[in-house]
């Protein structure tokens, strides 16, 4: 099991907005290349995201489903990435002064990932998940702060 945390300069509600938009998934999840469809009311329990992983033309189509969801604070997923296997992924958000802490815990539950020695699995997943949390935080921070006026172009006369 690999657990990584990152602080975001945005409230948990802003991070949740990113998690609750399945079409942004490929923007922050390392290895995801596109979203093909969403079934159900994401991120409601049992909703399903149809995605592809890899780089073109070597893409594999698979799905991620919502195991449970507590709006604004927790999203639990079952991510499939065959032939590598399946993973149980928990994302937790906790507000703190000036932002929030995002914690991602992932463990392989099927396939090759489950058969790898734990230190190897955790090291590889840890690197990937640190980058995913960095991307997730950047998206939430950018959306939370909104567009910034260009220097000298804020509409002031002088």
Image: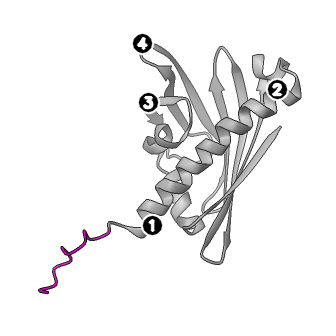
| Residue located beneath label 2 in the image | 120
- Residue 157 within the magenta-colored segment of the rendering: yes
Which callout, 3 or 1, points at the residue further toward the start of the chain?
A: 3
Where 124 sits versus 99, above or below? Answer: above
State the CA–CA distance, disc 1 to disc 2.
36 Å
Q: At 64% across and 67% down in the image, what residue appears?
A: 100
Q: At 25% across and 72% down in the image, what residue appears?
A: 151
Which callout, 4 or 2, points at the residue further toward the start of the chain?
A: 4
Mark 1: few/some/many CA within 10 Å (<14, 14-19, 20+): some
The range drawn in magenta is 148-158
Q: Along the line of sight, which residue is nearer the eye, 83 or 157?
A: 157
Q: Secondary structure at mark 4?
A: loop
Mark seen at residue 34 = 3
In the rendered structure, the answer to whether residue 90 lies left or right of residue 21 reads right
Q: Position of residue 131 (x, y in %)?
A: 61, 42
Foreground disc of the pair 4, 3: 4
Identify the image's colour scheme: rainbow, by chain, secondary structure or one colour.
one colour
| Residue located beneath label 4 in the image | 57
Q: Position of residue 16 (x, y in %)?
A: 55, 58
Q: Position of residue 85 (x, y in %)?
A: 71, 20
Which callout, 2 or 3, points at the residue further toward the start of the chain?
A: 3
Where 111 sits versus 88, above or below? Answer: above
| Residue located beneath label 1 in the image | 144
Q: Residue furthest bottom?
A: 158
Q: At 59% across and 65% down in the image, what residue appears?
A: 12
Which callout, 1 or 2, points at the residue further toward the start of the chain?
A: 2
Mark 4: few/some/many CA within 10 Å (<14, 14-19, 20+): few
Do the residues under discs 1 and 4 have CB atoms within 8 angstroms? no
């Amino acid at each position: 099991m690999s657990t990584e945390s990152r602080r975001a300069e945005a409230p948990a509600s802003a991070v949740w907005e990113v998690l609750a938009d399945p079409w942004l998934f490929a923007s922050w999840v390392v290895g995801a290349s596109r979203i093909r469809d969403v079934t159900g009311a994401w991120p409601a329990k049992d909703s399903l995201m149809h995605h592809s992983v890899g780089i073109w033309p070597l893409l594999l189509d698979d799905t991620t489903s919502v195991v449970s969801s507590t709006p604004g604070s927790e999203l639990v997923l079952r991510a499939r990435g065959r032939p590598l296997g399946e993973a149980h992924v928990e994302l937790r958000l906790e507000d703190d002064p000036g932002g929030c802490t995002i914690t991602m815990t992932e463990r392989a539950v099927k396939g090759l990932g489950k058969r790898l020695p734990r230190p190897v699995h955790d090291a590889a997943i840890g690197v990937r998940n640190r980058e995913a949390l960095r991307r997730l935080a950047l998206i939430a921070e950018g959306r939370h702060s909104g567009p910034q006026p260009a220097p000298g172009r804020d509409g002031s006369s002088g």
